[in-house]
Image (spheres, helix red, strand yellow):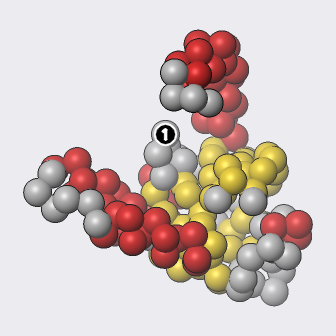
Amino acid sequence: MFIGEYYYNLDAKGRMAIPSKIRNQVGETLIITRGLDSCLFLYEKKDWEQLAEKIKNLPLSQANSRAFARLMLAGAMEVAIDGQGRILIPDYLRNYADLKKKIVLVGVYDRLEIWDEDNWNTYKNKTERESSEIAEKLSQLGI
């Protein structure tokens, strides 16, 4: 389970550190892909395989299913954790998420999200302001 916020800087080559606490939970490689809300998703291989299986079973006849599959699968790449505990974020994914120097790694249970720090703060502030409304809507789902 991944939780918490970790603030880092991307280096000149586009690498980011994975916190040692998280490195101890994962294997030597992770899967990185386009996420939602202008961030990147980072998965352990086993969790990625479960998600990919669900995506594979979406109805091919529906345009939204095809679009979601393309977003998640075509953008995915396996990344290795190097000896310094870093991963290289490919250029096309850094551009997709508008990652600059300062980034935030966010634990969201079965995945990690990688955000540009300014974008994360904007998103987080908006969500915090709307938290009562969000909670009320979720209560209708039994949460």
Left or right, 4 with respect to 47, comes to: right
Identify the secondary structure beneath mark 1. loop
Figure quadrant of residue 83: bottom right
Q: Position of residue 6 (x, y in %)?
A: 81, 50
- Asked whether residue 41 is in view, the answer is yes
Residue 87 image-quadrant placement:
bottom right
The spot of residue 39 in percent (x, y) is 54, 48
- Judged left or right of residue 64, residue 3 is right
Residue sitting nearer the eye, 41 or 12:
41
Between residue 64 and residue 138, name the one nearer to us.
Answer: 138
Q: Residue furthest left?
A: 61
| Image height of 1 relative to 89, above or below | above
Kindly identify the residue that appears in the image at 63 percent across and 59 percent down.
111
- Residue 98 versus residue 67: which sits nearer the camera? 67
Label 1 sits on residue = 37
Q: Give residue 74's position: percent from left, percent from top.
A: 34, 69
Identify the residue at horizontal 59%, vertical 50% (top origin): 99
Q: Residue at x 69, y 53 (%)?
A: 109
